[in-house]
Image (cartoon, grey):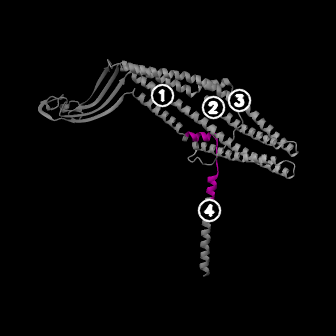
Amino acid sequence: MAHRFCATSQTALLLAAFLLGGWTCGVAQQVQASTPRHLTLSEAITQAQANEPIFASALAAQKSARIDGYLAKATLLPSVTYHNQMLYTQPNGQTNQGGQVGTQASPIFIANNAVHEYSSQAIVNETVGLKQFADAQVASANVARATAELEIARRGLVSAVVSLYYTVSTTQDKARIQSEAFAEARSFTALTQKREAAREVAHADVVKAQLQMQQKQRDVADANIAADKARLELGVLLFPDPRSAYTTDPPAAPPVLPTREEVNQLASKNNPEIRSALAAVNAANAGVKSAKAAYLPDLGLNFTYGIDAPQFAKHGPDGVPNLGYSISGTVDIPVWDWLSTQKRIKQSEIQRDVATVNLTATQRRLIATLEESYAEAATARDQLDLLDQSVHTADESLKLTKLRYAAGESTALEVVDAQNSYLAAQTAEADGVVRFETALAALQVLTGNL
Protein backbone atom coordinates (compact mmCIF):
# COMPACT_ATOMS: atom_id res chain seq x y z
CA MET A 1 0.00 0.00 0.00
CA ALA A 2 2.83 2.37 0.86
CA HIS A 3 4.64 1.41 -2.34
CA ARG A 4 1.54 2.23 -4.41
CA PHE A 5 1.18 5.58 -2.65
CA CYS A 6 4.85 6.40 -3.33
CA ALA A 7 4.47 5.56 -7.03
CA THR A 8 1.35 7.70 -7.26
CA SER A 9 3.12 10.58 -5.59
CA GLN A 10 6.05 10.33 -8.00
CA THR A 11 3.67 10.36 -10.96
CA ALA A 12 1.90 13.42 -9.61
CA LEU A 13 5.20 15.20 -9.08
CA LEU A 14 6.34 14.41 -12.61
CA LEU A 15 3.05 15.65 -14.07
CA ALA A 16 3.25 18.82 -12.01
CA ALA A 17 6.83 19.40 -13.11
CA PHE A 18 5.82 18.90 -16.75
CA LEU A 19 2.90 21.29 -16.49
CA LEU A 20 5.01 23.83 -14.62
CA GLY A 21 7.75 23.58 -17.23
CA GLY A 22 5.23 24.03 -20.05
CA TRP A 23 3.63 27.00 -18.31
CA THR A 24 7.05 28.57 -17.74
CA CYS A 25 7.97 28.05 -21.40
CA GLY A 26 4.65 29.56 -22.51
CA VAL A 27 5.16 32.58 -20.27
CA ALA A 28 8.69 33.03 -21.63
CA GLN A 29 7.38 32.90 -25.20
CA GLN A 30 4.67 35.43 -24.40
CA VAL A 31 7.20 37.76 -22.79
CA GLN A 32 9.50 37.38 -25.78
CA ALA A 33 6.63 37.95 -28.22
CA SER A 34 5.41 41.01 -26.33
CA THR A 35 8.86 42.58 -26.17
CA PRO A 36 8.80 45.50 -28.61
CA ARG A 37 11.36 45.38 -31.37
CA HIS A 38 13.63 48.38 -31.61
CA LEU A 39 13.61 49.73 -35.16
CA THR A 40 16.19 52.14 -36.53
CA LEU A 41 15.44 54.47 -39.40
CA SER A 42 17.68 52.56 -41.84
CA GLU A 43 15.96 49.28 -40.91
CA ALA A 44 12.56 50.87 -41.43
CA ILE A 45 13.59 52.07 -44.90
CA THR A 46 14.94 48.64 -45.85
CA GLN A 47 11.77 46.85 -44.73
CA ALA A 48 9.55 49.38 -46.48
CA GLN A 49 11.39 48.80 -49.75
CA ALA A 50 10.63 45.09 -49.46
CA ASN A 51 6.92 45.62 -48.74
CA GLU A 52 5.75 48.75 -50.56
CA PRO A 53 3.86 47.86 -53.81
CA ILE A 54 4.63 51.06 -55.74
CA PHE A 55 8.36 50.60 -55.19
CA ALA A 56 8.04 46.92 -56.13
CA SER A 57 6.29 47.92 -59.36
CA ALA A 58 9.03 50.44 -60.20
CA LEU A 59 11.68 47.80 -59.50
CA ALA A 60 9.89 45.28 -61.72
CA ALA A 61 9.55 47.88 -64.50
CA GLN A 62 13.26 48.63 -64.31
CA LYS A 63 14.18 44.93 -64.52
CA SER A 64 11.76 44.44 -67.43
CA ALA A 65 13.24 47.44 -69.26
CA ARG A 66 16.73 45.98 -68.85
CA ILE A 67 15.53 42.74 -70.43
CA ASP A 68 13.95 44.72 -73.28
CA GLY A 69 17.28 46.49 -73.79
CA TYR A 70 19.09 43.18 -73.98
CA LEU A 71 16.55 41.81 -76.49
CA ALA A 72 16.85 44.93 -78.67
CA LYS A 73 20.63 44.60 -78.78
CA ALA A 74 20.34 40.88 -79.49
CA THR A 75 18.51 41.68 -82.76
CA LEU A 76 21.72 43.32 -84.03
CA LEU A 77 23.52 39.98 -83.84
CA PRO A 78 23.08 37.05 -86.25
CA SER A 79 20.72 34.25 -85.29
CA VAL A 80 21.67 30.57 -85.67
CA THR A 81 19.18 27.77 -86.27
CA TYR A 82 19.84 24.07 -86.73
CA HIS A 83 17.17 22.93 -89.18
CA ASN A 84 16.23 19.26 -89.66
CA GLN A 85 13.57 17.93 -92.03
CA MET A 86 12.58 14.74 -93.79
CA LEU A 87 10.29 14.99 -96.84
CA TYR A 88 8.60 12.20 -98.78
CA THR A 89 6.67 12.87 -101.98
CA GLN A 90 4.62 10.41 -104.00
CA PRO A 91 6.46 9.47 -107.25
CA ASN A 92 4.80 10.11 -110.63
CA GLY A 93 6.22 7.01 -112.38
CA GLN A 94 8.94 8.88 -114.30
CA THR A 95 12.65 9.30 -113.61
CA ASN A 96 14.97 12.31 -113.62
CA GLN A 97 18.43 13.33 -112.58
CA GLY A 98 17.29 15.08 -109.39
CA GLY A 99 20.57 16.92 -109.08
CA GLN A 100 22.45 13.70 -108.38
CA VAL A 101 24.45 11.22 -110.40
CA GLY A 102 22.20 8.71 -112.11
CA THR A 103 18.44 8.61 -112.43
CA GLN A 104 15.81 8.39 -109.74
CA ALA A 105 12.05 8.48 -109.42
CA SER A 106 10.44 11.87 -110.07
CA PRO A 107 8.19 13.39 -107.39
CA ILE A 108 4.57 14.05 -108.22
CA PHE A 109 4.88 17.67 -106.96
CA ILE A 110 7.11 19.76 -109.18
CA ALA A 111 7.99 22.03 -106.23
CA ASN A 112 9.79 19.14 -104.50
CA ASN A 113 13.22 18.06 -105.65
CA ALA A 114 13.04 14.32 -105.02
CA VAL A 115 10.81 11.57 -103.68
CA HIS A 116 13.04 11.28 -100.60
CA GLU A 117 14.61 14.51 -99.40
CA TYR A 118 16.58 14.99 -96.16
CA SER A 119 17.59 18.36 -94.78
CA SER A 120 19.97 18.87 -91.86
CA GLN A 121 21.42 22.37 -91.94
CA ALA A 122 22.84 25.07 -89.71
CA ILE A 123 21.32 28.39 -90.81
CA VAL A 124 22.78 31.79 -89.91
CA ASN A 125 20.63 34.85 -90.61
CA GLU A 126 21.54 38.51 -90.18
CA THR A 127 19.50 41.61 -91.00
CA VAL A 128 21.33 44.93 -91.16
CA GLY A 129 19.34 48.16 -91.15
CA LEU A 130 19.11 51.54 -89.48
CA LYS A 131 15.85 50.60 -87.76
CA GLN A 132 17.52 47.86 -85.69
CA PHE A 133 20.14 50.30 -84.38
CA ALA A 134 17.51 52.97 -83.66
CA ASP A 135 15.36 50.46 -81.76
CA ALA A 136 18.37 49.51 -79.66
CA GLN A 137 18.86 53.19 -78.81
CA VAL A 138 15.20 53.47 -77.81
CA ALA A 139 15.54 50.44 -75.54
CA SER A 140 18.70 51.84 -73.93
CA ALA A 141 16.97 55.17 -73.27
CA ASN A 142 14.00 53.34 -71.76
CA VAL A 143 16.37 51.47 -69.45
CA ALA A 144 17.83 54.76 -68.28
CA ARG A 145 14.36 56.19 -67.78
CA ALA A 146 13.15 53.14 -65.82
CA THR A 147 16.25 53.34 -63.62
CA ALA A 148 15.55 57.00 -62.92
CA GLU A 149 11.89 56.24 -62.17
CA LEU A 150 13.01 53.55 -59.74
CA GLU A 151 15.19 56.09 -57.96
CA ILE A 152 12.25 58.51 -57.85
CA ALA A 153 10.09 55.81 -56.26
CA ARG A 154 12.85 54.96 -53.79
CA ARG A 155 13.34 58.54 -52.71
CA GLY A 156 9.61 59.12 -52.39
CA LEU A 157 9.32 56.02 -50.22
CA VAL A 158 12.26 57.12 -48.09
CA SER A 159 10.66 60.53 -47.56
CA ALA A 160 7.37 58.92 -46.52
CA VAL A 161 9.10 56.52 -44.13
CA VAL A 162 11.11 59.32 -42.51
CA SER A 163 7.96 61.37 -41.97
CA LEU A 164 6.04 58.42 -40.51
CA TYR A 165 9.03 57.29 -38.44
CA TYR A 166 9.40 60.58 -36.62
CA THR A 167 5.63 61.08 -36.47
CA VAL A 168 5.45 57.91 -34.35
CA SER A 169 7.96 59.33 -31.90
CA THR A 170 6.29 62.73 -31.86
CA THR A 171 2.77 61.39 -31.29
CA GLN A 172 4.10 59.37 -28.39
CA ASP A 173 5.68 62.53 -26.96
CA LYS A 174 2.39 64.33 -27.42
CA ALA A 175 0.56 61.57 -25.57
CA ARG A 176 3.06 61.88 -22.73
CA ILE A 177 2.68 65.66 -22.71
CA GLN A 178 -1.10 65.36 -22.57
CA SER A 179 -0.84 62.88 -19.70
CA GLU A 180 1.38 65.31 -17.80
CA ALA A 181 -1.07 68.13 -18.56
CA PHE A 182 -3.92 66.00 -17.24
CA ALA A 183 -1.97 65.28 -14.05
CA GLU A 184 -1.27 69.01 -13.70
CA ALA A 185 -4.96 69.84 -14.17
CA ARG A 186 -5.98 67.23 -11.64
CA SER A 187 -3.48 68.61 -9.14
CA PHE A 188 -4.79 72.11 -9.67
CA THR A 189 -8.37 70.85 -9.18
CA ALA A 190 -7.39 69.35 -5.87
CA LEU A 191 -5.75 72.65 -4.89
CA THR A 192 -8.88 74.65 -5.68
CA GLN A 193 -11.01 72.20 -3.70
CA LYS A 194 -8.76 72.59 -0.68
CA ARG A 195 -8.86 76.36 -0.92
CA GLU A 196 -12.62 76.27 -1.32
CA ALA A 197 -12.89 74.12 1.79
CA ALA A 198 -10.78 76.69 3.61
CA ARG A 199 -13.14 79.39 2.27
CA GLU A 200 -10.25 81.11 0.47
CA VAL A 201 -11.73 80.98 -3.05
CA ALA A 202 -15.17 80.76 -4.60
CA HIS A 203 -16.70 77.60 -6.03
CA ALA A 204 -16.25 79.10 -9.50
CA ASP A 205 -12.52 78.30 -9.27
CA VAL A 206 -13.31 74.64 -8.62
CA VAL A 207 -15.69 74.54 -11.57
CA LYS A 208 -13.10 76.14 -13.84
CA ALA A 209 -10.42 73.69 -12.70
CA GLN A 210 -12.76 70.72 -13.18
CA LEU A 211 -13.64 71.82 -16.72
CA GLN A 212 -9.94 72.12 -17.49
CA MET A 213 -9.27 68.65 -16.05
CA GLN A 214 -12.10 67.10 -18.06
CA GLN A 215 -10.81 68.69 -21.26
CA LYS A 216 -7.31 67.37 -20.58
CA GLN A 217 -8.74 63.92 -19.98
CA ARG A 218 -10.35 63.99 -23.42
CA ASP A 219 -7.12 65.30 -24.93
CA VAL A 220 -5.22 62.34 -23.45
CA ALA A 221 -7.59 59.90 -25.16
CA ASP A 222 -7.26 61.73 -28.48
CA ALA A 223 -3.47 61.81 -28.19
CA ASN A 224 -3.34 58.07 -27.51
CA ILE A 225 -5.54 57.40 -30.54
CA ALA A 226 -3.28 59.58 -32.71
CA ALA A 227 -0.22 57.70 -31.47
CA ASP A 228 -1.86 54.35 -32.26
CA LYS A 229 -2.81 55.55 -35.75
CA ALA A 230 0.75 56.70 -36.45
CA ARG A 231 2.14 53.35 -35.31
CA LEU A 232 -0.31 51.46 -37.51
CA GLU A 233 0.43 53.64 -40.56
CA LEU A 234 4.14 52.89 -40.28
CA GLY A 235 3.44 49.27 -39.39
CA VAL A 236 1.56 48.80 -42.67
CA LEU A 237 4.81 49.51 -44.54
CA LEU A 238 7.03 47.39 -42.33
CA PHE A 239 5.38 44.28 -40.92
CA PRO A 240 3.04 41.50 -42.03
CA ASP A 241 0.92 42.42 -39.01
CA PRO A 242 0.66 46.23 -38.59
CA ARG A 243 -0.16 45.67 -34.92
CA SER A 244 3.38 44.40 -34.22
CA ALA A 245 5.03 46.08 -31.25
CA TYR A 246 8.09 48.19 -32.01
CA THR A 247 9.97 51.23 -30.78
CA THR A 248 11.70 54.00 -32.72
CA ASP A 249 14.59 56.32 -32.09
CA PRO A 250 13.81 59.89 -31.02
CA PRO A 251 14.92 62.65 -33.39
CA ALA A 252 18.62 63.33 -33.09
CA ALA A 253 20.20 66.73 -32.64
CA PRO A 254 19.46 68.84 -35.72
CA PRO A 255 22.44 68.82 -38.09
CA VAL A 256 23.99 71.83 -39.74
CA LEU A 257 22.43 72.52 -43.10
CA PRO A 258 24.74 72.69 -46.13
CA THR A 259 25.02 75.94 -47.98
CA ARG A 260 22.61 76.75 -50.76
CA GLU A 261 25.37 76.48 -53.36
CA GLU A 262 26.25 72.95 -52.21
CA VAL A 263 22.62 71.92 -52.34
CA ASN A 264 22.21 73.32 -55.85
CA GLN A 265 25.27 71.47 -57.12
CA LEU A 266 24.16 68.15 -55.63
CA ALA A 267 20.64 68.52 -56.96
CA SER A 268 21.81 69.38 -60.49
CA LYS A 269 24.11 66.33 -60.62
CA ASN A 270 21.98 63.75 -58.89
CA ASN A 271 18.32 64.38 -59.57
CA PRO A 272 16.32 61.42 -60.91
CA GLU A 273 13.45 63.57 -62.23
CA ILE A 274 15.86 65.33 -64.60
CA ARG A 275 17.44 62.02 -65.61
CA SER A 276 14.03 60.50 -66.30
CA ALA A 277 12.89 63.46 -68.42
CA LEU A 278 16.20 63.51 -70.30
CA ALA A 279 15.98 59.78 -70.98
CA ALA A 280 12.45 60.28 -72.30
CA VAL A 281 13.77 62.89 -74.74
CA ASN A 282 16.55 60.53 -75.87
CA ALA A 283 14.02 57.74 -76.38
CA ALA A 284 11.78 60.06 -78.39
CA ASN A 285 14.68 61.15 -80.60
CA ALA A 286 15.63 57.54 -81.23
CA GLY A 287 11.95 56.80 -81.97
CA VAL A 288 11.96 59.46 -84.70
CA LYS A 289 15.10 57.92 -86.16
CA SER A 290 13.50 54.47 -86.07
CA ALA A 291 10.42 55.75 -87.88
CA LYS A 292 12.52 57.42 -90.61
CA ALA A 293 14.52 54.21 -91.06
CA ALA A 294 11.47 52.70 -92.78
CA TYR A 295 12.42 54.76 -95.88
CA LEU A 296 15.76 52.93 -96.15
CA PRO A 297 16.38 49.39 -97.44
CA ASP A 298 17.40 46.49 -95.21
CA LEU A 299 20.21 44.10 -96.08
CA GLY A 300 19.53 40.44 -95.31
CA LEU A 301 22.35 37.89 -95.22
CA ASN A 302 21.97 34.10 -95.05
CA PHE A 303 24.55 31.36 -94.67
CA THR A 304 23.46 27.71 -94.77
CA TYR A 305 25.67 24.69 -94.15
CA GLY A 306 24.57 21.06 -94.05
CA ILE A 307 22.71 18.43 -96.06
CA ASP A 308 19.78 18.79 -98.45
CA ALA A 309 19.79 15.60 -100.50
CA PRO A 310 17.84 12.41 -101.31
CA GLN A 311 20.09 10.51 -98.86
CA PHE A 312 20.72 11.30 -95.19
CA ALA A 313 24.46 10.89 -95.58
CA LYS A 314 27.58 12.92 -96.21
CA HIS A 315 27.99 11.31 -99.63
CA GLY A 316 25.48 10.15 -102.22
CA PRO A 317 25.82 7.54 -105.01
CA ASP A 318 29.25 7.34 -106.64
CA GLY A 319 30.73 9.41 -103.80
CA VAL A 320 28.91 12.61 -104.71
CA PRO A 321 29.18 14.97 -101.69
CA ASN A 322 25.89 15.88 -99.99
CA LEU A 323 27.46 18.14 -97.33
CA GLY A 324 27.95 21.75 -98.44
CA TYR A 325 26.94 25.36 -97.98
CA SER A 326 25.14 28.24 -99.66
CA ILE A 327 25.26 32.00 -99.19
CA SER A 328 22.56 34.49 -100.11
CA GLY A 329 22.02 38.21 -99.75
CA THR A 330 18.84 40.24 -100.20
CA VAL A 331 18.09 43.94 -100.30
CA ASP A 332 14.46 44.99 -99.71
CA ILE A 333 13.80 48.52 -100.98
CA PRO A 334 10.56 50.14 -99.75
CA VAL A 335 8.60 51.72 -102.57
CA TRP A 336 5.06 52.52 -101.44
CA ASP A 337 3.18 52.00 -98.15
CA TRP A 338 0.30 54.45 -98.52
CA LEU A 339 2.09 57.14 -96.46
CA SER A 340 2.19 54.93 -93.36
CA THR A 341 5.85 55.73 -92.73
CA GLN A 342 5.17 59.46 -93.01
CA LYS A 343 2.40 59.20 -90.42
CA ARG A 344 4.62 57.21 -88.05
CA ILE A 345 7.31 59.85 -88.35
CA LYS A 346 4.78 62.58 -87.57
CA GLN A 347 3.53 60.62 -84.60
CA SER A 348 7.04 60.12 -83.20
CA GLU A 349 7.84 63.82 -83.67
CA ILE A 350 4.74 64.76 -81.65
CA GLN A 351 5.89 62.49 -78.84
CA ARG A 352 9.36 64.03 -79.01
CA ASP A 353 7.92 67.54 -78.65
CA VAL A 354 5.94 66.46 -75.58
CA ALA A 355 9.06 64.90 -74.03
CA THR A 356 10.98 68.14 -74.60
CA VAL A 357 8.26 70.19 -72.91
CA ASN A 358 8.27 67.78 -69.98
CA LEU A 359 12.04 68.14 -69.64
CA THR A 360 11.93 71.93 -69.47
CA ALA A 361 8.98 71.80 -67.04
CA THR A 362 10.87 69.34 -64.82
CA GLN A 363 13.89 71.62 -64.78
CA ARG A 364 11.76 74.60 -63.73
CA ARG A 365 9.95 72.55 -61.10
CA LEU A 366 13.27 71.33 -59.68
CA ILE A 367 14.52 74.89 -59.25
CA ALA A 368 11.33 75.97 -57.50
CA THR A 369 11.10 72.86 -55.30
CA LEU A 370 14.75 73.18 -54.32
CA GLU A 371 14.26 76.77 -53.23
CA GLU A 372 11.10 75.92 -51.31
CA SER A 373 12.62 72.90 -49.58
CA TYR A 374 15.78 74.72 -48.56
CA ALA A 375 13.82 77.67 -47.19
CA GLU A 376 11.50 75.31 -45.29
CA ALA A 377 14.40 73.35 -43.79
CA ALA A 378 16.31 76.48 -42.81
CA THR A 379 13.27 78.08 -41.21
CA ALA A 380 12.34 74.92 -39.34
CA ARG A 381 15.92 74.56 -38.11
CA ASP A 382 16.03 78.14 -36.84
CA GLN A 383 12.69 77.79 -35.05
CA LEU A 384 13.76 74.77 -33.00
CA ASP A 385 15.75 76.92 -30.59
CA LEU A 386 12.90 79.43 -30.30
CA LEU A 387 10.43 76.63 -29.59
CA ASP A 388 12.68 75.27 -26.85
CA GLN A 389 12.92 78.71 -25.30
CA SER A 390 9.15 79.02 -25.43
CA VAL A 391 8.77 75.75 -23.50
CA HIS A 392 11.11 76.94 -20.75
CA THR A 393 9.38 80.32 -20.58
CA ALA A 394 5.92 78.77 -20.42
CA ASP A 395 7.06 76.35 -17.72
CA GLU A 396 8.44 79.17 -15.62
CA SER A 397 5.25 81.20 -16.15
CA LEU A 398 3.11 78.27 -15.00
CA LYS A 399 5.15 77.79 -11.84
CA LEU A 400 5.01 81.50 -10.97
CA THR A 401 1.27 81.70 -11.67
CA LYS A 402 0.57 78.71 -9.41
CA LEU A 403 2.63 80.28 -6.64
CA ARG A 404 0.74 83.53 -7.03
CA TYR A 405 -2.55 81.63 -6.97
CA ALA A 406 -1.56 79.78 -3.81
CA ALA A 407 -0.77 83.17 -2.26
CA GLY A 408 -4.11 84.53 -3.41
CA GLU A 409 -2.58 87.00 -5.90
CA SER A 410 -3.95 85.48 -9.14
CA THR A 411 -7.15 83.89 -10.37
CA ALA A 412 -7.93 80.38 -11.49
CA LEU A 413 -8.38 81.66 -15.03
CA GLU A 414 -4.78 82.85 -15.07
CA VAL A 415 -3.59 79.40 -13.94
CA VAL A 416 -5.63 77.69 -16.64
CA ASP A 417 -4.23 80.06 -19.27
CA ALA A 418 -0.71 79.33 -18.07
CA GLN A 419 -1.38 75.59 -18.25
CA ASN A 420 -2.70 75.90 -21.80
CA SER A 421 0.25 78.05 -22.82
CA TYR A 422 2.70 75.49 -21.46
CA LEU A 423 0.89 72.66 -23.22
CA ALA A 424 0.75 74.61 -26.50
CA ALA A 425 4.49 75.32 -26.28
CA GLN A 426 5.33 71.66 -25.72
CA THR A 427 3.07 70.55 -28.57
CA ALA A 428 4.52 73.17 -30.90
CA GLU A 429 8.03 71.97 -30.07
CA ALA A 430 7.09 68.36 -30.90
CA ASP A 431 5.50 69.48 -34.17
CA GLY A 432 8.54 71.61 -34.94
CA VAL A 433 10.82 68.58 -34.69
CA VAL A 434 8.68 66.64 -37.18
CA ARG A 435 8.50 69.65 -39.46
CA PHE A 436 12.30 69.95 -39.52
CA GLU A 437 12.90 66.22 -40.05
CA THR A 438 10.36 66.13 -42.88
CA ALA A 439 11.82 69.23 -44.53
CA LEU A 440 15.34 67.86 -44.15
CA ALA A 441 14.27 64.55 -45.70
CA ALA A 442 12.67 66.38 -48.63
CA LEU A 443 15.88 68.34 -49.17
CA GLN A 444 17.99 65.19 -48.96
CA VAL A 445 15.67 63.46 -51.41
CA LEU A 446 16.31 66.22 -53.93
CA THR A 447 20.07 66.04 -53.47
CA GLY A 448 20.32 62.25 -53.21
CA ASN A 449 21.99 62.19 -49.79
CA LEU A 450 19.35 60.06 -48.03
Residue 46 magenta: yes
Distance of mark 1 from mark 3, alpha carbons?
A: 39 Å
Q: Amino acid at mark 3?
A: Thr
x, y (%) of residue 288? 43, 20
Q: Amino acid at mark 4?
A: Trp
Report the residue marked by disc 2. 442
* Residue bounds of the magenta highlight: 27-49
Report the residue marked by disc 3. 379
The first of marks 4 and 1 along the sequence is 4
Label count reads 4
Report the residue marked by disc 1. 142
The first of marks 4 and 3 along the sequence is 4
Q: Residue at x 58, y 40 (%)?
A: 46
Q: Which one is closest to the eye, mark 1 or mark 2?
A: 2
Which quadrant of the figure has residue 261?
A: top right
x, y (%) of residue 191? 82, 49
Report the residue marked by disc 4. 23
Q: Residue at x 38, y 21 (%)?
A: 129
